[in-house]
Image: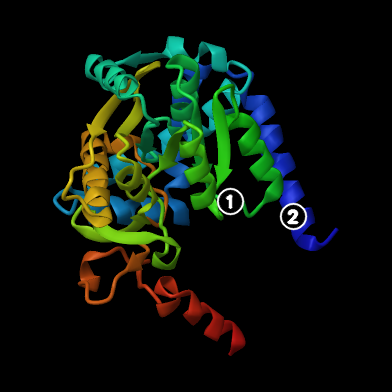
Amino acid sequence: MNMKKIRDYIIYLLVQFYGTVIAFVPRTWYMGIGRFWAPLISLFPVGKVAAQNVQAAFPEKSKKEVRRIVRESLAHMIAVSCEFFWIRKRNADLPSLVDIEEQTLKNFERCRKAGKPVIFISPHHGNWEFGGQMLAIGLGFTISTIMRSPQNPYLGKLLVSGRSVKGVEIIFSKGAARAVMKAVKDGRSIGILMDQNTRVRDGGIFVDFFGLKVPVTSLPARIALKDKLPIVLGTEYRTGKRFGMTTVYIEPQDDDTEESLTQRMISAVEEIVRKWPEQYLWAYRRFQHIPPGEDRSRYPAYSEFAKPSFFDQRERGKKKQA
């Protein structure tokens, strides 16, 4: 076993130990635990990234308000990690924790009447871990969810075991397009976390998010336009000790392109984040890649102009040969 495998396994054991312990802690304590640790975590690089992101997204907010949002976001992130382990053996209880808005129930009924698979998209907002499970357990959808291919295979197995429930199939992001097409052909709906950095060479498109260009996957738009499938954007937002579920129904139009439809999805994501900014995962380099020609001064300090290899696989090959 090489050093990387040993390191990966040690990390897995630590995470597993944390999960075992936290699963015995009352769920209603998790936000309190998060708020206790958030001020300390905000001093580390992850907290600084979050602060830069919030300031870039909300330049009109004071430093005091930015700090408040960052700390609440970090507390929420910790609570979500706790809830991942808590729900693993209690997923049958999930529907009793979530209050579904009336319009959202109408959106789901509209999907059922259409009689087609649905493209479910979600940002890292609220408890995003509950999304796919709630759709399957609470609402009866059969869904294939896309998960980023893990760098640590042991943690990958842990994540798959926590997200796999009856009615949910996991598809890894590497080579996902073909598996997604097959799932749709088989009548399964698709679940995608929409706010991750996707290289252009891997099917990403630059769209506006809080007035800044960011790369996101074009796969949902491509599938929706090809098969005329409805798109539902949703989040399970925290309401005290419970959760609410809200959705937006997005129907592809005849004049839509992959770019215009993707932009409509991300604009809907932005509306949700603006409504509950404290529940968004800001501790992630969302504005990392700047497209050529953009104003660098508007982006966070960590941001960089996208390299040629971000756009073209052949440039990556040239770099390896050099």
As drawn, is 217 to the left or to the right of 44? left
SS label for mark 2: helix
Q: Residue at x 77, y 56 (%)?
A: 5
State how far apart marks 2 and 1 are (Cα): 18 Å
User: Around disc 2, counting alpha carbons within 10 Å, would you say few (fewer than 14), some (14 to 19), or many (20 or more)?
Assistant: few
**Residue farthest to the bottom?**
322
Residue 173 visible, this orientation: no
SS label for mark 1: loop
Q: Where 1 falls versus 233 (above or below)?
A: below
Q: Quadrant of residue 205?
A: bottom left
Tally of numbered tags? 2
Q: Depth check: give the residue in front, 130 or 229.
A: 229
**Residue farthest to the right?**
1
Q: Depth check: give the residue in front, 90 or 216.
A: 216
Q: Residue at x 18, y 48 (%)?
A: 62
Which residue carries the number 2 mark?
Answer: 7
Which residue carries the number 1 mark?
Answer: 149
* Amino acid carrying mark 2 in the image: Arg
* Amino acid carrying mark 1 in the image: Ser
As drawn, is 88 to the left or to the right of 35? right
Residue 259 visible, this orientation: yes
